[in-house]
Each structure stands twice: as C-alpha cells, then as structure tokens.
Image: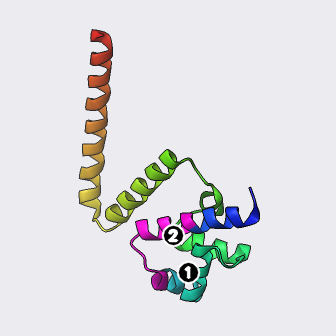
Amino acid sequence: MHDKEFLKKIGKRIRLLRKSQELSQEELAELTELHPTYIGEIERATVNASIISFQKIAKALNMTLTEIFNTPSQKEEEKSLILQKILVLLRKQDVKLLRYIEKSITELTEFIKTKKRKKKFES
C-alpha cells in the first residue's frame, strides 16, 4: 500500500470514528489540542500527521493507536461503527439503566442462540 493510500484510509477511518461519536472536527480539535483545520487535513490525507497527533486523536476517541491504524474489512468496519454508536448512547445512561440494558442484551442473546440451535436441530 502506498503512503498516500494509507493516509487516506486512516483519515477516512478517523472521520468515521469521529462521526460515530457525534463529534465535530472542532470538538475533536478541542479534545486533542490540535487545530480544527489540521483535523480536516488529517481526515482528507492532505498532511502527513505525526505519531503524536494520531496518539492525541486516538485518546480523544477512547481508542488505542492500534485501533486507529487497523484498517478492517468493510464488514468489520461497519460492526465497529455500530459498536461505537452504541457506546456513545450507553455512556449517557445511569448505572441502573445500564444494568437493565445489560440484562436485556444477555437474555436476547440467549434467546437467539436457543432459536438457532432449535432451527439447526430441526433441519
């Protein structure tokens, strides 16, 4: 992969992750102490950002550098974005509601597993 291609993929990933967390470029810039224009340049791959800048972005997005630089398949990218959106929603909830959500997800997951096993058995 050429350098420019790599920077484009990383920039696109940062933009998707930022948007999935409902952050504007200005808000991300504030969290990272980088200029909003610089954030835009990173996302458009018009600048070769330093590793320190990427570290600041990763920290602001509650991610590791590895997660920022990992360019997953389209299916994995979609899954990652869905999970990021869910996390944004969950972070806004109180503990009592989070416990209820956790219990509901556990029960739903078990129900789906049971249904799949039953369907497999009937086949």
Q: How many numbered circles are shown?
A: 2
Residue at the right extreme, as displayed: 2
- Residue 86 falls in image quadrant: bottom left
Rendered residue at 53%/84% (across/down)? 29
Residue 14: say if magenta: yes
* Amino acid carrying mark 1 in the image: Gly
Nearest the eye: 65 or 19: 19
Q: Decide: few, some or many residues near mark 1? Use Cα within 10 Å; few <14, some 14-19, many ≥20.
A: some
Q: Decide: few, some or many residues near mark 2? Use Cα within 10 Å; few <14, some 14-19, many ≥20.
A: many
Q: Position of residue 115 (x, y in %)?
A: 26, 24
- Residue 41 falls in image quadrant: bottom right
Q: Position of residue 58 (x, y in %)?
A: 59, 69
Q: Name the residue under label 1.
A: 40
* Amino acid carrying mark 2 in the image: Arg
Q: Mark 2 points at which residue?
A: 15
Residue 85 vs residue 47: left or right?
left
Residue 50 vs residue 94: left or right?
right
- Eyeballing the image, is 85 above or below 56? above
Magenta-drawn stretch, dominant element (helix, strand or loop) = helix
Residue 11: say if magenta: no
- The residue segment tinted magenta is 12-27
Residue 108 vs residue 80: left or right?
left
Residue 69 vs residue 86: left or right?
right
Q: Position of residue 22 (x, y in %)?
A: 39, 72
- Eyeballing the image, is 99 above or below 111? below
What distance separates the C-alpha of mark 1 from that of mark 2? 9 Å
Q: What element carries label 1?
A: helix
